[in-house]
Image (tube, rainbow, N blue to C red):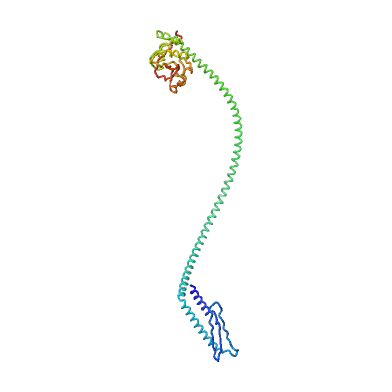
């Protein structure tokens, strides 16, 4: 590679020297009537060529112009021969390198042409892009102007709407303020009325409590009156029906009362009808003495342990038991250890009984069950 470069540089230097430079030196000498022309070799390095001066002994010794011209022509031929020989020697030294360099130069030229063609295509494409960009820019500018115009119109509409809304808000605000003032007045009036009503409620509450107390007294009196009325009615009926009990096998028990005991199981309603048909009532055990006398008598009957009494919650609230004359049952007579009474409830009719051999207490059963009967003769009949 370095040899090729040196050869090319040498050829270029010689060519430049042959075209652009003048004769480097002339050396004319005269010896024994013979004149000789010496040509110094041309230095091809970076040094400037040496210039050989024309030496003479004086102006009289100068040769004629014709002779000089001839000698100059000879020198030129010698120079050309020398240059040609130099070129031939240089070409013989690196012929292949010169050929390769020529090929490479041709290839470089071809590639340069391709690059120039591509550059022209790119310039054309760039021009197209510039034109397209200009068109798009114009379109965008038009759109921007249209958008700005719409925005301005919308802003104006919003400003108008905002002003209208502001005016409407001011009017509504005034209406609301007026409404609030009216509402405040109404609230104050309502509070005053509320305080007045609270005072009235307290008064009415006191009156209600007084009425409830009065009603309670009346109810108690009413209950007592109803009991007395029922007893009076039973007394009248007993006197009218005492004759029906004549000839009945009655037993006088430890409480000095007279009873009829029947060992036949029936429902509570059937037992009531049976006793009343014979001028008697179903037996009542209103106290411990009556209860003890009845249990003492019924304990004597083997295989007969359950006996109906007159009490039930028929016609009353569930669990509110009353004797046949309307008087309530003493709660202490129930068998609390067994949880009595325990069979009453909504849509149920529960009746009272005693059980032989058990502790001396009262029990309840559904009235439809069948138990034995104990009838009691009214005191008015003896």
Q: Viewer-proximal residue, 121 or 363?
A: 363
Outermost residue, bottom direction? 33
Q: Viewer-proximal residue, 311 or 159?
A: 311
Picture quadrant of residue 324 = top left
Instruction: Give the x, y percent position of residue 227.
Output: 49, 15
Figure label count? 0
Left or right of residue 355: residue 72: right
Picture quadrant of residue 60 = bottom right
| Residue 318, above or below 139 | above
Instruction: Give the x, y percent position of residue 372.
Output: 40, 15
Q: Viewer-proximal residue, 241 or 62?
A: 62
Instruction: Give the x, y percent position of residue 178.
Output: 61, 37
| Residue 239, above or below 109 | above
Q: What residue is shown at x 52% (from left), y 56% (from top)?
A: 140
Instruction: Give the x, y percent position of residue 167.
Output: 59, 43
Q: Viewer-proximal residue, 40 or 327?
A: 40
Q: Quick one: quadrant of the C terminus?
A: top left
Left or right of residue 199: residue 341: left
Picture quadrant of residue 284 = top left
| Residue 183, above or below 229 | below
């Amino acid at each position: 590679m370095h040899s090729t470069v040196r050869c090319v540089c040498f050829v270029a230097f010689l060519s430049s020297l042959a075209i652009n430079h003048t004769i480097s030196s002339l050396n004319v000498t005269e010896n024994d009537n013979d004149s000789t022309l010496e040509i110094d070799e041309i230095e091809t390095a970076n040094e400037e060529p040496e210039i050989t001066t024309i030496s003479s002994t004086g102006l009289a010794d100068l040769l004629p112009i014709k002779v000089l011209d001839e000698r100059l022509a000879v020198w030129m031929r010698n120079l050309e021969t020398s240059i040609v020989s130099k070129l031939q020697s240089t070409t013989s030294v690196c012929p292949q390198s010169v050929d390769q360099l020529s090929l490479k130069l041709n290839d470089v030229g071809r590639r340069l042409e391709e690059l120039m063609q591509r550059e022209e295509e790119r310039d054309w494409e760039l021009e197209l892009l510039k034109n397209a960009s200009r068109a798009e820019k114009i379109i965008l500018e038009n759109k921007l102007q249209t958008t700005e115009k719409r925005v301005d119109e919308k802003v104006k509409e919003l400003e108008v709407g905002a002003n209208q809304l502001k005016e409407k808000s001011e009017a509504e605000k005034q209406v609301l303020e007026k409404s609030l003032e009216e509402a405040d007045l109404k609230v104050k009036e309502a509070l005053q009325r509320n305080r007045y009503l609270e005072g009235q409620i307290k008064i009415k509450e006191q009156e209600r409590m007084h009425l409830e107390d009065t009603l309670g007294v009346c109810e108690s009196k009413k209950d007592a009156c109803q009991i007395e009325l029922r007893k009076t009615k039973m007394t009248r009926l007993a006197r009218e029906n005492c004759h029906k009990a004549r000839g009945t096998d009655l037993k006088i028990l430890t409480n000095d009362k007279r009873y009829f005991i029947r060992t036949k199981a029936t429902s509570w309603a059937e037992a009531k009808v049976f006793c009343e048909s014979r001028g008697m009532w179903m037996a009542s055990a209103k106290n411990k003495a009556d209860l003890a006398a009845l249990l003492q008598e019924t304990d004597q009957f083997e295989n007969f342990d359950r006996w109906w009494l007159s009490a039930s919650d028929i016609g009353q609230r569930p669990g509110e038991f009353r004797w046949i004359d309307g008087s309530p049952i003493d709660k202490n007579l129930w068998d609390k250890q067994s949880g009595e009474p325990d069979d009453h409830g909504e849509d149920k009719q529960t009746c009272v009984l005693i059980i032989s051999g058990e502790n001396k207490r009262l029990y309840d059963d559904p009235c439809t069950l069948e138990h034995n009967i104990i009838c009691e003769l009214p005191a008015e009949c003896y």
